[in-house]
Amino acid sequence: MVLAYMKTWLDRSITTRELFFLLTLIFCFSPLISPPGALLLGLVFAHLIGHPFLHLNHKATHYMLQLSVVGLGFGMNLAGAWKAGSQGFLLTLFSIAVTLAGGFLLGRVFQTEKKASFLISAGTAICGGSAIAAISPVIQAEEKQISVALGTVFILNSVALFVFPILGHAWHLSQSQFGLWCAIAIHDTSSVVGAAGRYGPEALQVATVVKLARALWIIPVTVVSAFVFKRKASKVKIPYFIAWFVLAMVANTYIPFVGHYGHFLVDFSKGGLTVTLFLIGCGLNRRVLGSVGWKPFFQGVLLWILIGVSSLVTIRCFL
């Protein structure tokens, strides 16, 4: 069936919109466009032209992001990564607790639908869309609730990619401080890596390691959410690609051949990340943006400000 579908698609003539999309995708692999520029280009594409392969967009961004993150591991040293991860552990634990508690209180204040409120809180606390995708089937969230949470998180995540580097330079944050702040206060891994990569190589390493360590909290939070919503425990989606990221770091640290040529994979992975952000932008069409009501969105903004300000103050004062 799959081969028959592929043959049918290849036999038909490609449309102008599809050709333009594929050429733009190739352009995003080049060094001529930055990650924020790719995201903005995707937004323009979604609203003026329309995504010709929208039904494939979610899976494409999912796998492209994972491959790109694993590739970045070939440019990182294990000792430096361990230092960054241990440095951010307590702050990660504190920020997740504060965000989930703050989300619960804000949800009560704005009387946001309970499941949508929890998904927004979990997406802000852990790793954006990945956390929402993992938790939503466990609490049996409806499509509307998932769309509201994803729309809120993706909009704020896109804003962060542009705003955070500007604020980091304005407040004279070191690369280590900025990388840690990105990992704590930006929702999705794609924008965390994109913003930190613009700031510098040390910021990129700290942000990537801490964010991936943070993503592992999907597992306990998902289990707890099943009890909170009184659902039978479902299968938890474990982010196994993090193990491949660690193996890439180990190879880069201890295998001379990989350490010498790993930068080619890193460069390719940065291009893959830029493509991922373009695809994310293409997915933010009018339907997604229109699904977000003002109450959930305002809750998401206040929750984002809460975690952004509290984590920044902690980093500036103690790290």
Image (cartoon, rainbow, N blue to C red):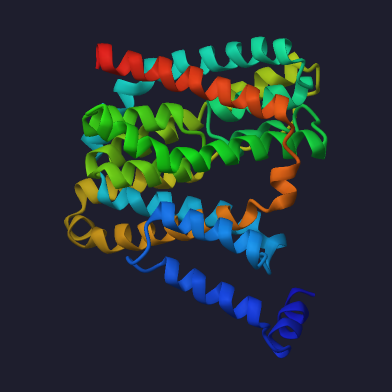
- Name the quadrant of the C terminus: top left
From what the image shows, is residue 294 above or below residue 104?
A: below
Residue depicted at 80% across the width and 75% down the height:
1
Give coordinates of residue 249: x percent, y percent.
30, 45
- Can residue 238 be seen here? no
Q: Quadrant of residue 145?
A: top right
Q: Nearer the viewer, residue 132 or 313?
A: 313
Residue 155 lies left or right of residue 115; in this view the side is left
Q: Nearer the viewer, residue 253 or 7?
A: 7
Residue 180 lies left or right of residue 309; in this view the side is left
Residue depicted at 47% across the width and 19% down the height:
307
Q: Nearer the viewer, residue 99 or 71?
A: 99
Give coordinates of residue 22: x percent, y percent.
55, 75
From what the image shows, is residue 95 above or below residue 194?
A: above
From what the image shows, is residue 273 above or below residue 5?
A: above
Give coordinates of residue 7: x percent, y percent.
72, 85
Residue 314 lies left or right of residue 23; in this view the side is left
